[in-house]
């Protein structure tokens, strides 16, 4: 605020079109909000034909920051050090004892924002001018056409020019002259965005002239055709994103259930443990490391989530599962009870409410491909992460010693034991691996949703469906099933709604399993021998 006061002092000596005390008071102290809004608009419109007055911008910023007081028909800008300056002259002033705060409601804040955007059109920074032009285009007003024309005459940047032309065309949509309205529709039709579609639809509802309505309808049809591609691609990406989440959740189950034949109803809770491990790493970074390192917490959270879930899985296998091999019903009941214990344990440690896990800054925002299609970075990262995990699991199963032992024990436990494979240890390693992958799924899910004790319950059923549909024990089938169900579900959601889409997918799976009980790929593994 000291800078503001200094700038006002310097500007006091400039220009013949300085902000007057009466203008400043009417903008801040008029009784009615509409009167204040009119005063602000008049002051900004005056800039279209006069030398721009920087003091007006400074005063509007002070208004937006609630740093203006009024007393005795004058407005004062008050700094954080409680020192005041005269809003009109910028000179230091003594704030009267009866000075009153200026209160802005939402309507006035919107007016002030637009006024600041209009003034920013004459600024030196291209980015600020672009932002200002976009703001004016989003909220068109015929009273700003003169100001926009002046900005267009001086503007050199093509991007800002295009936005200004769009703002002018949007403002002319309500013109009384038919040709101007038709010309405005032609300009806006080239800007095929959802915002333009909304603007033209609003105009179409009020338009009475048949010729203009015809032009509006043709423009809206062209925009709708263009936007349809963005919507279709968006639905496909959403399906792939959902499929990658299902893939992550089902990969661990493809090992514990698909290869080992263990119906692990606690798989969802292993996912939950991975999510909470991610939360703990985030908290540790927030409390004990510099803020600049926070963006790296996810890099450490990935192995921590894997190890936490793998450790719990190993304890589960050693403590319970190993005594129940070959008895799937008892395994189901035992792991269901364990899942309840794990949920209650987490509730006791962290509470029943969800905990917040933030995205690192490099996962925020999105990749804009089309006007109505922006792919969120966190979703893109999860798709990539899912396929990296898939590649790692496939490599481990096909190329490593542990993978060889797992396949050997799965196909013929007695023969594997005869050739020296420690089958009990292999079972523990395999179960811990499947559990660790569930932890990785939890780490990924923490970046796109809430983390709570019930997190795993949302994915346990879908995980079993993916494994069964893909073919028990088949990684390739798991991939096809996860992505297929994800894309199919999202496409049906856009057509029938979420509930009917879920029912339709379940019916599809039931019919498919009836026709092909072994799933997409043939059944292999211990279950096949049972």
Image (cartoon, grey):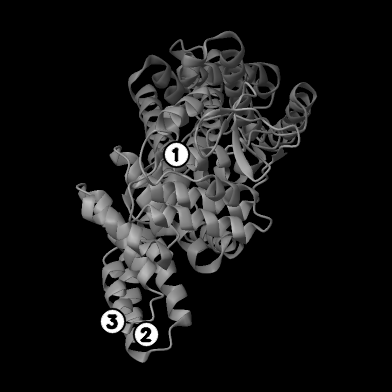
Q: Kindly identify which residue carries mark 3.
A: 179
Give the x, y percent position of residue 109: 58, 49
Q: Residue at x 28, y 56 (%)?
A: 150
Is residue 162 positioned above or below 297 on the image? below
Provide the secondary structure element on which disc 3 rests.
Answer: helix
Q: Residue at x 46, y 22 (%)?
A: 406
Structural distance between the alpha carbons of marks 2 and 3: 12 Å
Give the x, y percent position of residue 185: 31, 74
Q: Residue at x 53, y 33 (%)?
A: 447
Out of 131 and 66, give the one closest to the viewer. Answer: 66
Out of 172 and 482, give the one closest to the viewer. Answer: 172
Structural distance between the alpha carbons of marks 1 and 3: 39 Å
Front label number (1 vs 2): 1
CB atoms of marks 1 and 2 within 8 Å: no
**Mark identifier at residue 55:** 1
Provide the secondary structure element on which disc 1 rests.
Answer: helix
Out of 408 and 62, give the one closest to the viewer. Answer: 62
Residue farthest along the bottom direction in this orientation: 210
**Picture quadrant where residue 288 is located:** top right
**Mark identifier at residue 217:** none
**Mark identifier at residue 213:** 2
Report the side of 106 relative to 144 (left or right).
right
CB atoms of marks 1 and 3 within 8 Å: no
Is residue 49 positioned above or below 456 on the image? below
* Camera sees residue 523: no
Quick one: label 1 or label 2, which is nearer the N terminus? Answer: 1
């Amino acid at each position: 605020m000291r800078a503001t006061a200094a700038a006002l002092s310097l500007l006091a000596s400039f220009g013949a079109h300085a902000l007057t005390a009466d203008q400043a008071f009417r903008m801040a102290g008029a009784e009615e909000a509409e009167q204040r809004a009119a005063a602000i608009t008049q002051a900004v419109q005056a800039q279209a034909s006069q030398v721009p007055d920087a003091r007006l911008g400074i005063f509007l910023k002070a208004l937006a920051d609630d740093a203006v007081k009024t007393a005795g028909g004058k407005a004062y800008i008050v700094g954080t050090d409680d020192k005041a300056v005269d809003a009109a002259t910028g000179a230091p002033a003594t704030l009267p004892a009866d000075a009153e705060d200026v209160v802005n409601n939402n309507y006035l804040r919107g007016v002030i924002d637009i006024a600041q955007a209009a003034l920013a059109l004459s600024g030196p920074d291209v980015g600020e001018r672009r932002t200002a032009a976009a703001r004016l285009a989003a909220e068109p007003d015929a009273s700003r056409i003169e100001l926009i024309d002046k900005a267009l005459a001086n503007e050199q940047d093509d991007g800002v020019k295009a936005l200004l032309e769009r703002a002018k065309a949007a403002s002319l949509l309500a013109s009384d002259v038919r040709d101007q309205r038709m010309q405005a529709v032609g300009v806006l039709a080239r800007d095929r965005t959802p915002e333009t579609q909304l603007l033209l639809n609003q105009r179409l509802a009020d338009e009475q002239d048949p010729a203009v309505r015809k032009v509006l309808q043709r423009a809206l049809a062209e925009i709708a055709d263009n936007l349809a591609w963005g919507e279709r691609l968006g639905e496909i990406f959403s399906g792939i994103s959902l499929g990658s989440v299902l893939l992550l959740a089902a990969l661990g189950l493809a090992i514990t259930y698909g290869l080992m034949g263990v119906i692990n109803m606690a798989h969802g809770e292993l996912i939950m443990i991975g999510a909470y491990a991610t939360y703990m790493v985030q908290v540790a970074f927030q409390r004990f490391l510099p803020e600049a390192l926070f963006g790296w917490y996810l890099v450490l959270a990935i192995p921590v989530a894997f190890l936490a879930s793998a450790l719990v899985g190993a304890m589960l296998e050693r403590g319970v599962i190993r005594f129940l091999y070959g008895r799937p019903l008892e395994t189901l009941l035992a792991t269901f009870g364990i899942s309840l214990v794990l949920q209650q344990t987490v509730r006791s440690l962290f509470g029943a409410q969800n905990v917040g896990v933030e995205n690192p800054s490099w996962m925020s925002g999105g990749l804009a491909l089309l006007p109505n299609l922006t792919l969120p970075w966190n979703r893109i990262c999860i798709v990539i992460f899912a396929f990296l995990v898939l590649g790692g699991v496939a490599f481990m199963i096909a190329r490593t010693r542990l993978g060889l032992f797992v396949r050997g024990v799965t196909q013929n436990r007695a023969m594997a034991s005869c050739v020296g494979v420690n089958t009990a240890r292999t079972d523990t390693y395999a179960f811990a691996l499947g559990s660790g992958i569930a932890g990785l799924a939890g780490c990924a899910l923490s970046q796109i949703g809430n983390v709570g004790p019930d997190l795993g319950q949302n994915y346990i059923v879908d995980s079993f469906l993916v494994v069964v549909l893909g073919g028990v024990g088949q990684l390739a089938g798991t991939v096809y099933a996860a992505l297929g169900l994800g894309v199919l579900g999202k496409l049906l959601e856009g057509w029938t709604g979420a509930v009917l889409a879920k029912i339709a997918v379940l019916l599809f799976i039931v019919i498919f399993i009836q026709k092909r009980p072994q799933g997409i790929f043939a059944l292999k593994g211990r279950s096949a021998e049972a």
